[in-house]
């Protein structure tokens, strides 16, 4: 399972960490809004069958 979360969204990051999601990467300059770039954190949880 994979999620992309803005690095400034601390409540969401903390919530996903509570459910054992791991930070696996960062996408720099993921989105530009009002002339400012925002990075995106990639979080994943590896599920077993």
Image (cartoon, rainbow, N blue to C red):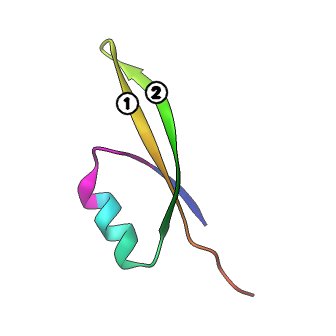
Q: Quadrant of the C terminus?
A: bottom right
At label 1, counting other C-alpha atoms closer than 10 Å, the crowd grade (few under 14, some 14-19, many 20 or more) is some
Relative horizontal placement of residue 38, taking residue 27 as reference (left or right):
left
Circle 1 sits in a helix, a strand or a loop, which is it?
strand
At label 2, counting other C-alpha atoms closer than 10 Å, the crowd grade (few under 14, some 14-19, many 20 or more) is few
Marker disc for residue 23: none
Kindly give the residue lying farthest to the top in the view shown: 35
Q: Which residues are magenta?
A: 5-11
Residue 13 coordinates in the image, percent (x, y): 34, 60
Residue 43 coordinates in the image, percent (x, y): 50, 59
Q: Are marks 2 and 1 in contact (CB under 8 Å)?
A: yes
Kindly give the residue lying farthest to the right in the view shown: 49
Residue 2 coordinates in the image, percent (x, y): 58, 60
Q: Residue at x 38, y 71 (%)?
A: 17
For disc 1, the marked residue is 38
Residue 32 coordinates in the image, percent (x, y): 41, 20
The answer to if 10 sits in the magenta stretch is yes
For disc 2, the marked residue is 29
Q: Please, is residue 35 above or below residue 23 in the view?
A: above
Q: Residue at x 48, y 32 (%)?
A: 28
Question: Residue 1: which quarter of the image?
Answer: bottom right
Q: Residue at x 45, y 26 (%)?
A: 31
Measured in 3D between alpha carbons, the distance from the residue under mark 2 to the one under mark 1, in whole angstroms, is 5 Å
Q: Residue at x 37, y 30 (%)?
A: 38
**Of label 2 and label 1, which has the lower sequence position?**
2
Q: Please, is residue 21 above or below residue 29 in the view?
A: below
């Amino acid at each position: 399972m994979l999620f992309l979360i803005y690095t400034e969204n601390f409540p969401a990051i903390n919530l996903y960490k509570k459910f054992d999601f791991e930070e696996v990467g960062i996408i720099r300059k993921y989105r530009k809004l009002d002339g400012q770039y925002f990075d995106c954190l990639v979080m994943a949880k590896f599920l077993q069958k």
